[in-house]
Every structure is written in structure tokens, then in C-alpha cells.
């Protein structure tokens, strides 16, 4: 790829039933966060775990964005208890969990959002809480489904940055306000990861791969939401873009 060509960023699709048939689908906001927030080309990767397909897609992309989703990772991937409210996507699990390790090995920058944040932790050996709001002393991190979508994705709480974090460096601040649209969260952080930010209740809200030669960064909130009008959210995509440019 010549230097004057735009970056190509891969996104792994959800596999969901629409009527009687399965479809591979990705939310418009994630696609636009790449096309508008990064001025890059989004490449949709089907939720298919065949190694030869994953290798082929990996060779086509300059970065990998792991999106949020209504579905959750199947608990058996982190030795979790069976889910009380199973909303799973085993096809997506079959693609993202191996692809994360492949991308790290190939030095392809990775940005994880919400489910993608949880996928990176699980792929690298971490575990999850399935219902954070039921834990003593923890906040309810879910959105109010009765509110308009702008309210659901509006500022919900602060996140406090670690002093040596990428977030502190790129923003020059020690905290920021974020949205909160999840009920699962980090239980045990994978050994290869370092905490970037925490919610007021202590829940890990952002992390990075703890090595200087790879860009793997993830957040529990949704920075793709109206990314071009939110300087903090845009700074995350800018850091991702810079890592993709450097690798390219």
C-alpha cells in the first residue's frame, strides 16, 4: 500500500438473526467513527472463525476496531458461570478471540470498545463480572432504556486516569466524563494488560497492552458516539490512527 492511500481499518461483524436468517452486521456509528473520525476506509470482517479467513483479512488491514454489541461473550471462554440472561454471539467469539492474538503477533494496532474491551481481556486470560450492578458497592453502569438515545449516550460518570496512562498523556487531564452503556465489566484484568482509567466505584474502564512496541488500547465506554463533536472521544481515535500510520 502506498503512503498516499488511506488507512484500512477492519471491524468484526456481529452475527444476528433477522427473521429466519443470520446476517453479519455492524452498527453505523462504528463505521462512521472510522470514515469520519479517522478519514480511513472501514473493512467489514464477517463473524467467521476460520483461520485462513482471519489471516487473509489481517493482511488487508492497517488496524482493527473491536466494536460494542448487544451480545456478550459466552462465559465458558473465561470459566464464568452460565449466564442468567444469555445474549450471546458464538460466531463473533470464534472470530474476535483468536483474531486479537493474531493482530498482536502481527503488530496490527487494536482499539476495543465495550464488548471489544471485554474481548481483549478475555482473549488474553482475564475474566468478567456478568452483572456489575448486583455487586456490593458498585454503581449501576447501565443506560436507561426509557430515555432518548442522546441521553443514553450522554455523560454518565467520570473516569479517573492513571498517572502514567496514555489517556493522561493525550488529554493533559487526570479525568473525563464518559457515557455508560453496559452491565458486564472487568473482574480480573489479564496479566498482559495495564489499567488506564477507573470509574468512581473502582471498575476498570480503560486499559492498554503493557508493552511499548504494540498499540492495543480499549475502553468500556462508547467514544464512537458523535466522535467528531467530542474532543476527548476524538483524541482516542486520533491516537489509534497515529499508531496505524506508524505501523503502515
Image (tube, rainbow, N blue to C red):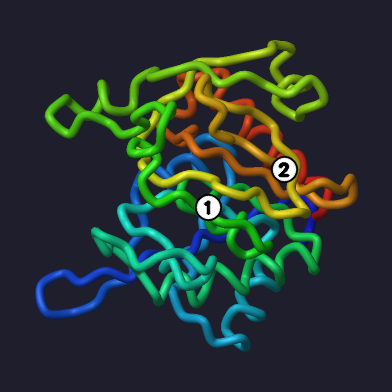
Q: Residue at x 79, y 68 (%)?
A: 106
Q: Residue at x 67, y 44 (%)?
A: 217
In front here: 228 or 2?
Answer: 228
Q: Measuring from the top left, give residue 235's x and y in whole percent.
A: 63, 26
User: Can you say whether 133 is above or below 163 in the image?
Assistant: below
Q: Residue at x 35, y 68 (%)?
A: 82
Q: Quadrant of residue 162?
A: top right
In front here: 113 or 233?
Answer: 113
Say whether residue 176 is left or right of residue 29.
Answer: right
Give the numbered dot on residue 216.
none
Element on which disc 2 rests: strand
Q: Dot 2 surroundings within 10 Å: few (below 14), some, or many (20 or more)?
A: many
In the picture of the structure, the residue carrying the numbered disc 2 is: 208
Say whether residue 53 is left or right of residue 240.
Answer: left
In the picture of the structure, the residue carrying the numbered disc 1 is: 118
Q: Dot 1 surroundings within 10 Å: few (below 14), some, or many (20 or more)?
A: many
Q: Is residue 143 visible?
A: yes
Amino acid at each position: 500500500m502506498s503512503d498516499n492511500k488511506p488507512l484500512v481499518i477492519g471491524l468484526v461483524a456481529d452475527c444476528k438473526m433477522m427473521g429466519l436468517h443470520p446476517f453479519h452486521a455492524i452498527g453505523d456509528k462504528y463505521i462512521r467513527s472510522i470514515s469520519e473520525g479517522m478519514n480511513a476506509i472501514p473493512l467489514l470482517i464477517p463473524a467467521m472463525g476460520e483461520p485462513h479467513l482471519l489471516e487473509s483479512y489481517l493482511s488487508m488491514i492497517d488496524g482493527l476496531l473491536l466494536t460494542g454489541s448487544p451480545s456478550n461473550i459466552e462465559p465458558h471462554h473465561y470459566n464464568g458461570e452460565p449466564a442468567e440472561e444469555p445474549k450471546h454471539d458464538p460466531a463473533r467469539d470464534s472470530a474476535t478471540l483468536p483474531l486479537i492474538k493474531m493482530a498482536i503477533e502481527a503488530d496490527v494496532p487494536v482499539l476495543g470498545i465495550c464488548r471489544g474491551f471485554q474481548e481483549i481481556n478475555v482473549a488474553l486470560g482475564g475474566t468478567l463480572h456478568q452483572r456489575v450492578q448486583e455487586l456490593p458497592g458498585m454503581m449501576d453502569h447501565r443506560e436507561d432504556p426509557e430515555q432518548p438515545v442522546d441521553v443514553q449516550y450522554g455523560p454518565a460518570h467520570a473516569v479517573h486516569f492513571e498517572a502514567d496512562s496514555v489517556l493522561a498523556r493525550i488529554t493533559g487531564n487526570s479525568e473525563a466524563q464518559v457515557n455508560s452503556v453496559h452491565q458486564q465489566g472487568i473482574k480480573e484484568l489479564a496479566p498482559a494488560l495495564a489499567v488506564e482509567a477507573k470509574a468512581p466505584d473502582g471498575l476498570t474502564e480503560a486499559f492498554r497492552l503493557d508493552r511499548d512496541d504494540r498499540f492495543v488500547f480499549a475502553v468500556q465506554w462508547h467514544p464512537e458516539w458523535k466522535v467528531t463533536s467530542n474532543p476527548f472521544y476524538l483524541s482516542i481515535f486520533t491516537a489509534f490512527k497515529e499508531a496505524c500510520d506508524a505501523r503502515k
